[in-house]
Each structure stands twice: as structure tokens, then as C-alpha cells.
Amino acid sequence: MKKQALFASIVLVVAVGSVMGQKIETQASNGAAITRVQTALNHLTVIQLSEPVLWVAAGSQAFKVEWRENKVFIEPTEPNASTNLFIWTKSGRLNYELEPAGEVAQMHFAIDEPPIDPPASKAPVAAADPPGRQSVDESAALLGGRPVRMSAYKPGRNGIQLWIKDLFQRDDRLFIRYAVENWSSQAYEVATPRVFLLEAPHGPYPIFLRRNSQLSDGEARRIKSNKQVPLEVIHEEVRTAQVKPGEETVGVVGVKLPTAGEDAIVLRLVLPEGGRRQTMATLVF
């Protein structure tokens, strides 16, 4: 009986030790530092911030990254995967390094940021946005962004590449987060993309089933339309106006959509030429 009790005690101690090894941390965010996050396969890690998340970017598709309001959910899809992760909020950018924990007992279950203390004095009322413009905070308040798939898109390794990352929609307003990569030998000045609606698009039917997808150049050429209708831009923002060779930047462009039915909508984003070949991205959503 004593041996059985001793064995049960050992099992209990091991079990408690494993649970205690799993980490739930509370730490203030620091945009000048890199926070290391240990993850485990088939397990979810949550980063909870004190303000809404505007967007996120991970360096590898070996991680599934989603966000809702002020929470970011991270799940590795491959064993022993590691990459970097960036999270943008109104206050700036946060930097993370995602690493395999080795054992589930050593992973981060959650990293919580303490709430921001309210200011002692009443803050001045911010000036209203000019007519026809929407604040980026409003776009961040949209209930969940839709990631854009690019599995069929094969990037080139020269010139300028335009990627569509996420979509945020509220009523007739669509906010598009995009990235510009510079694979040329010269610095590139990023201007706001022009957004066109392809009127009455037609082409191979399977293409229109690929909602929330950026088409390859070959697929885009197979879609025909009556004409391209320019859409009204209601918001524009880019992180860095100039992109050096081998670097990239991200931006957001918001447009007002016309009334549409349930059929797929095809949009085309075009970067101003600026003395070089025109760069485009075609989106089905």
C-alpha cells in the first residue's frame, strides 16, 4: 500500500511539473526588442495586446496566423518550424521570433500585455477626418480580416512585385493590405495603387470559384471584361515610401465598392509606372 501511494505521489508531481512548465506570461510590449515565442505542433499560442491589431505578417507559411480585435492566434503547421512575426498596432510595430518549444511543457500558451492606464487628464478631441476619408483605426475595427491566398502565384525575381495580403470590408468599403517587393537594382518610389473594377468579367469558370485569391499573371490574362472602372480611393497609407533593392514595404488602400450581387468581384491593382514596366495584381473575392 505504501509503494502504491509513493508511486501515485511521483506521478502527481510529474504531472504538476509539466503543467507548471507551460508558460502564460504578462509582459509590456517593446517595439525596440524582439520577443521570443515558443510554439508546439497541434497547439495554439495567443498574444493578447492592449489595443486592436491593424495587421500581421509572418515570414513563413509553416505557421497559421490569424487575429481578431486585440488577439493574435499562432499555430505551427510543420514540426520544428521557426520564423519571425510582425504585429502592427496604432502605437507601432512589435517584433517576435517564433521558435519550436521542443516539448509541449515548454511552450508559450499565452503572452498578455497589461492594459494601458488611462491618462490623468482628458485628451484633446482629435480632428475629424476630411470628408470622403476614413481613419485607419476604423479599418482596424472591422471584424476580422480575410487573408488572400496566393498558392498559385509564382513570384518573379526581377522588377517590382505587388502582393495582396488581406482584405477588410465593411458595407461598401474595402480596405486592401498589400506589399511591394523591390527585386530591381534601383530604389523604387511607392505611390498609391490605382484600383479598378473589371466590369462583367468573363473567362474560365473555375477561376471565379477562387474567392479571396490573387491570380497568377497567366490566369489574369485569361479574364476579359467590358471595361475597367476606377474606384474611389477613401484611404491610403504606406509604411515606407521608398523601397531599396532587395527590400519590401507594406501599405493599405481603401476603396468604395459599387453595389454588387453574389457573383465574384474581380479587382485589379495597378502601381503607377514611374518610368518602368507597369506592375499589377488581380484579385478575385
Image: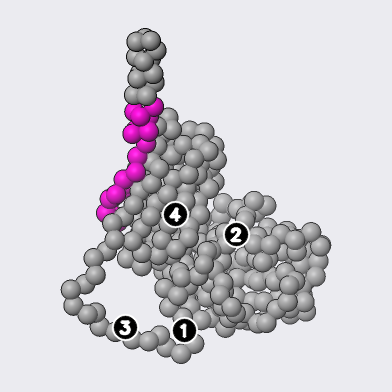
- Front residue (pair 19, 51): 19
Query: Which mark identifies residue 148?
Result: 2
Q: Earlier in the sequence, mark 1 or mark 4?
A: 4
Q: Is residue 34 above or below residue 188?
A: above
Look at 44% across and 54% down and name the residue there. Answer: 72
- Nearer the observer: mark 3 or 1; the answer is 3
> Which quarter of the picture shows residue 258?
bottom right
Q: Which residues are magenta?
A: 14-35
Look at 28% across and 50% down and name the residue there. Answer: 27
Screen quadrant of the N terminus: top left
- Front residue (pair 174, 192): 174
Look at 48% across and 44% down and name the residue there. Answer: 44
Asked if residue 58 lies left or right of residue 281, the reply is left
> Label 2, label 1: how many angstroms apart (C-alpha)?
24 Å
Q: Residue furthest left?
A: 120
Residue type for callout 3: Ala
> Label 2, label 4: how many angstroms apart (C-alpha)?
17 Å
> Label 1, label 4: how many angstroms apart (C-alpha)?
28 Å
Q: To which residue does mark 1 refer?
A: 133
Screen quadrant of the C terminus: bottom right
- Nearer the observer: mark 1 or 4; the answer is 4
Q: Callout 2: 10 Å neighbours few (<14), some, many (20+)?
A: many
> Label 4, label 3: how many angstroms apart (C-alpha)?
28 Å
Residue at disc 1, secondary structure: loop
Q: To which residue does mark 4 refer?
A: 72
> Label 3, label 1: how many angstroms apart (C-alpha)?
15 Å
Q: To which residue does mark 3 refer?
A: 126
Q: Earlier in the sequence, mark 3 or mark 1?
A: 3
